[in-house]
Amino acid sequence: MWGAVREGLEAGGGNVGLIVDTPRDVGVAAAHRTVEMVEGADAPIVGLRLSGIEGSVPEGEFHVLREAADELGLGLAAHAGETGGPERVWAALDDLGADRIGHGVASARDAALMERLVRDGVPGRSMPLVQHLELQRRAARAAFAAQDEQSRLEDRVVL
């Protein structure tokens, strides 16, 4: 499989690096399988990433990703602060050891966190339109949900 990926990327004439993702909500065992797959890959992999539902599994439980990134000379990114609060970004930095934060918009609500991101030079990636559409989707779903579920859904929308 990796040979085909590598050949396809090389045929395109560009310089492309892959970031291999593990969704946190499928559990830590999936992170171990991701690491095993990456260790045997013959492809231009430049990083690992933790994505998925924020808060579903504590970031620190995915230490295997940080360890593998260090051993393999890869970066480690984490989606954090998109649907969760600033505490998810803190956890991605301190408990997981992320080098880069995906989304991270909740960081703007915590001055100390913003100072840390700047001081440590932590790059971030934000997609405001996608996040805006996701919040609209959640709000619409909450508006049409049964009353008891509506409260639960509204509690998860963090601005």
Image (spheres, rainbow, N blue to C red):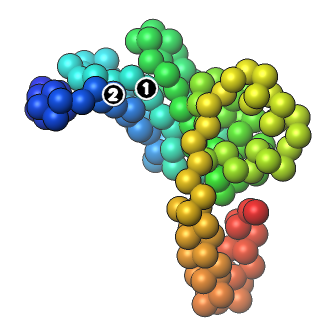
Q: Which amino acid type corresponds to the residue marked 1 in the rendered image?
A: Gly
Q: Quadrant of residue 17?
A: top left
Q: Which mark is residue 47?
A: 1
Q: Is residue 96 visible?
A: no
Closer-to-camera residue (112/95): 112
Q: Decide: marks 1, 2 in contact (CB < 8 A)?
A: yes
Q: Is residue 159 left or right of residue 149?
A: right
Closer-to-camera residue (51/122): 122
**Mark 1, secondary structure of its residue:** strand
Q: First in sequence: mark 1 or mark 2?
A: 2
Q: Is residue 5 left or right of residue 19?
A: left
Residue 119 percent location from the top left of the image: 78, 22
Residue that appears at 69% across and 23% down: 121
Residue 48 percent location from the top left of the image: 44, 29
Q: Which mark is residue 38?
A: none
Residue holding disc 2: 17
**Mark 2, secondary structure of its residue:** loop
Q: How many marks?
A: 2
Q: Is residue 122 left or right of residue 44?
A: right
Residue that appears at 16% across and 35% down: 12
Compared to 131, does 91 lie above or below? above
Classed neighbour count for the residue bearing mark 1: other residues with Cα under 10 Å, few (<14), some (14–19), many (≥20) = many
Q: Which amino acid type corresponds to the residue marked 2 in the rendered image?
A: Gly
1 or 2: mark nearer the eye: 2
Q: Quadrant of the C terminus?
A: bottom right
Residue that appears at 75% across and 69% down: 155
Residue 83 percent location from the top left of the image: 66, 57
Q: Quadrant of the N terminus?
A: top left
Q: Is residue 126 visible?
A: yes
Cα–Cα gap, marks 1 and 2: 8 Å
